[in-house]
Image (tube, rainbow, N blue to C red):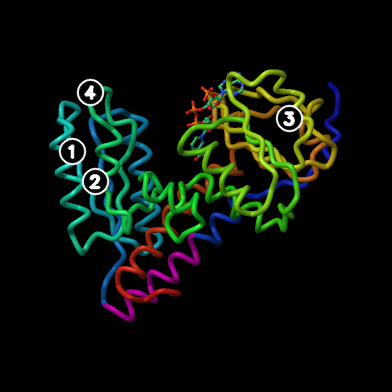
Amino acid sequence: MSQTRSTARLMDGTALARTTVAEAAASAAEIKRRTGVTPCLATVLVGEDPASVTYVKMKQNRCAKAGIESRHVTLPASVSTAELVAAVTALSDDPAVHGILLQHPVGPHIDERAAFEAISPAKDVDGVTMHSFAAMGFGEPGFVSCTPGGIMRLLDAYDVELSGKHAVVVGRSAILGKPAGMLLLARNATVTYCHSRTVDLAAHVRQADVLVAAVGKPEFIYGADIKPGAVVIDAGYNAGNVGDVDFESAAERASLITPVPGGVGPMTIAVLLAQTVGAAARQLGLDGV
Ligand code: NAP
């Protein structure tokens, strides 16, 4: 068996998520002390898809541990768009709710965009509304999509210089690849987006000082295509607990690399909790807590 000559330093998302959640918990406690109000995240689940049920439970458990209240709304898979919009609007109008998470996918018969847009921008802690996306694009205050937000926190925690660097983002989904590239651009990286129609993907990957893999294909990017010294962020999470990057070969060339699991994954919920507490602080007039 060949031995791995791993030279890359690991970017420990589990540890950073722990710190991020501890900070959110401290802020939640401070908000409670100063106002008597406990920050509250409302989760909305349509149907009983086992993976979605698990995700929502996980988010509620994490909230409880961080001193964040959670309110849960379950709707049948047969719910109409109008009924779902009404349920989300009621949460948007409820002053006791500070953040709203609509677990998706919500089902093919539902206008998902209409449901997302019923989330008040002030409570859009999952960063799914057009308002949040535009605010991010314009560099205005607002909530970011949680996984790209987690990626940026990881890069900052490991003091990765972004200005003037070439960042290559493989994937352009609205919740991950596209916002990740926009956040990198806002930090003065030169950004290339790659996607399923990109010609000669490897040639682009080879230019990356910072590579973000957000494809959803197991071990799709090989170490041979990683620029020596690159920072590799693997946002993929595929069956068999593997990412979108072939970790062993990539770790031989990268300077920093996120493991899967334990890299980007844990940061997503951590950012959700941090943004929920931030939303509560803002709604209660306690900016900066
Ligand atoms: P998605 O919506 O399916 O998007 C995948 C992207 O990859 C698309 O933009 C697609 O291009 C591109 N792509 C597909 N085949 C490609 C190819 N052969 N060459 C280059 N690009 C290709 O997936 P997603 O929601 O962004 O998720 C991506 C991965 O991240 C998944 O593994 C998912 O599980 C993981 N994820 C993790 C977290 C977390 O919390 N850690 C959160 C969200 C997602 P087109 O646009 O041209 O189709």
**Up-down relation of residue 91 to residue 220 (above or below):** below
Location of the N terminus by quadrant is top right
- The residue labelled by disc 2 is 118
- The residue drawn where x is 37% and y is 44% is 130
| Disc 3: CA contacts within 10 A as few (<14), some (14-19) or many (>=20) | many
Q: Earlier in the sequence, mark 2 or mark 1?
A: 1
On the image, which quarter does residue 8 sit in? top right
Q: Earlier in the sequence, mark 1 or mark 4?
A: 1
- Residue 126, percent from left and from top: 39, 48
| Numbered range of the magenta stretch | 21-35
| Disc 2: CA contacts within 10 A as few (<14), some (14-19) or many (>=20) | some
Q: Amino acid at mark 4?
A: His
Q: Earlier in the sequence, mark 3 or mark 2?
A: 2
- Distance Cα–Cα, label 3 vs label 1: 41 Å
- The residue labelled by disc 1 is 84
- The residue labelled by disc 3 is 205
* 25 inside magenta stretch: yes
Contact, CB < 8 Å: mark 2 with mark 1?
yes
| Disc 1: CA contacts within 10 A as few (<14), some (14-19) or many (>=20) | many
